[in-house]
Amino acid sequence: MPQHLPIRKCLILTSGFKLSLLTLLTNRQLFLRHLAQTSDAPLMLEIERAEGIYMYAPNGKRYIDLISGIGVSNVGHRHPKVVAAIESQLGKYMHLMVYGEYVQSPQVILAQKLAATTLSKLDQVYFVNSGTEAIEGVMKVAKRSTGRSEFVSCEKAYHGSTHGALSIGGGEYFKQAYRPLLPGMSQIRYGNIDDLEIISCRTAAVIIETVQGEAGVQFAGKAYFQALRDRCTFTGTLLILDEIQCGFGRTGTFWAYEQTGIVPDMLVTAKGMGGGLPIGAFLAKEEVMACIKTDPFLGHLTTFGGNPVCCAASLGVFEALETENLLSKVKQKEHLFRSLLVHPLITAFRSQGLMMAAEMPDFFTLKKVIDLAIEHGVVTDWFLYCDNSMRLAPPLIISESEIREVCKILLACMDKVMLDETKQS
Ligand code: PMP
């Protein structure tokens, strides 16, 4: 046996014991050993199954998912309509051909449904696999269709982690190590009307979240979006709304932009769209979208984009939203959260439907509350660009009594943290 190998590896290599020794390593150890890590402090929650708003650890401990897997499980985990739609599609086919060639009914029906959500103002859909990929797609379409290459986006915006999406991202901390990124990118302050002057006849598109998620739930309001729309129309710039986090019912309307009175030129979605399966899409008018099919033809390709099983899952999400009338109850649930989550540690509360942020004095206090809440079976989080605010984005199916239960737990955690802090000072 080679002497230089770590003991554990040597043992695994000893064939007779291979399986039994492998099982000695826990999933948590294997996670740290074999999964590439995104930080030095992963959450490390081990979940065996999830249903509705609940997730269950292998020891049976129950957690309430108050962040919906970061805006994904809008209709809850394993919603029966989503599961049924997936199962039905599994019995037919899982993959036939790369995107855009065959007529696959789950894609066709889903595209028609998505177009209808925009009242057919954006009547064509391009399917992809994720949010960041949808952003790459709109950037390419915007360049081609306008013949321009400059983009304007916002400070504290998050649009994804691939190179194009990172280039329009709003945080220098995340960008600096990966430069050079795309040239011709400018950032404006979200919600600041004066900054709209930067948008010029050289700007291909403005890409903006209708409600900024990772900035800690910020909504610029109707007047801002109207001014932005006017400026884009004046300069011939495409207005692209990123509704990856705030779309699919999260704010109480199907799209958050419905609350602004404007219509974008392109719309980007993912996350909640698949009810737990990976799918994204971008929507535009046919005349905008047409540019990617010629000169060069096949201007944007994807093998798995619009995977039929994922499209079926998304149709299940539509069915769940419709049959349970979930959108109509969002505002009521938001108000309940707002009325219950009153505590000296909460210094501000921002919300757009069930996309909510409870601000605390600082990260350290917030982190103590979050850790304690997880211990008590409530999973929450903070935001990429706003580390003093608690992320609250439960599945839309959460009931009034569950909201009361969860708020009671959170308030008790805040009481405990406050008491500990006063004892220490
Ligand atoms: N845009 C927004 C607003 C997002 O919140 C996210 C993901 N947090 C993305 C884009 C990127 O999506 P994905 O992680 O699916 O690539």
Image: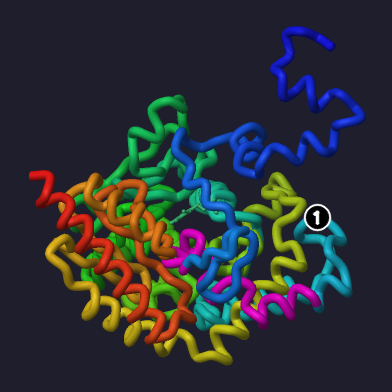
Question: 311 or 9, which is in the foreground?
Answer: 9
Task: Note whether 43 is above or below 288 in the view shown.
Answer: above
Q: Position of residue 422 (x, y in %)?
A: 10, 52
Q: Which amino acid does label 1 sit on?
A: Val
Q: Can residue 194 be seen in this view?
A: no
Residue 16 lies left or right of residue 73; in this view the side is: right
Quarter placement of the C terminus: top left
| In the image, farthest residue toward the left | 425
State the residue at coordinates (38%, 39%).
185
- Tell me which corner region of the image, top left, top right, bottom left or bottom right, holds residue 103: bottom right
Q: Which residue is drawn at 38% across and 53% down?
A: 206
Residue 214's spot in the image, x, y percent?
Answer: 36, 53
The residue that appears at 40% across and 49% down in the rendered structure is: 158
Q: Name the residue under label 1.
A: 98
Task: State the residue in front, 267 or 272.
Answer: 272
In magenta, the rendered stretch is 64-87
Q: Quadrant of residue 262?
A: bottom left
Magenta span includes 396: no
Q: Which of 3 and 339 is in front in this view?
A: 3
Q: Is residue 156 visible?
A: yes
Coloring scheme used? rainbow
Residue that appears at 50% across and 91% down? 325
Residue 85 falls within the magenta-colored stretch: yes
Crowd class of label 1 (few under 14; some 14 to 19; many from 20; radius 10 Å): some
Residue that protrudes farthest toward the right in the picture: 16
For the N terminus, the image quarter is: top right
Q: Position of residue 25 (x, y in %)?
A: 69, 37
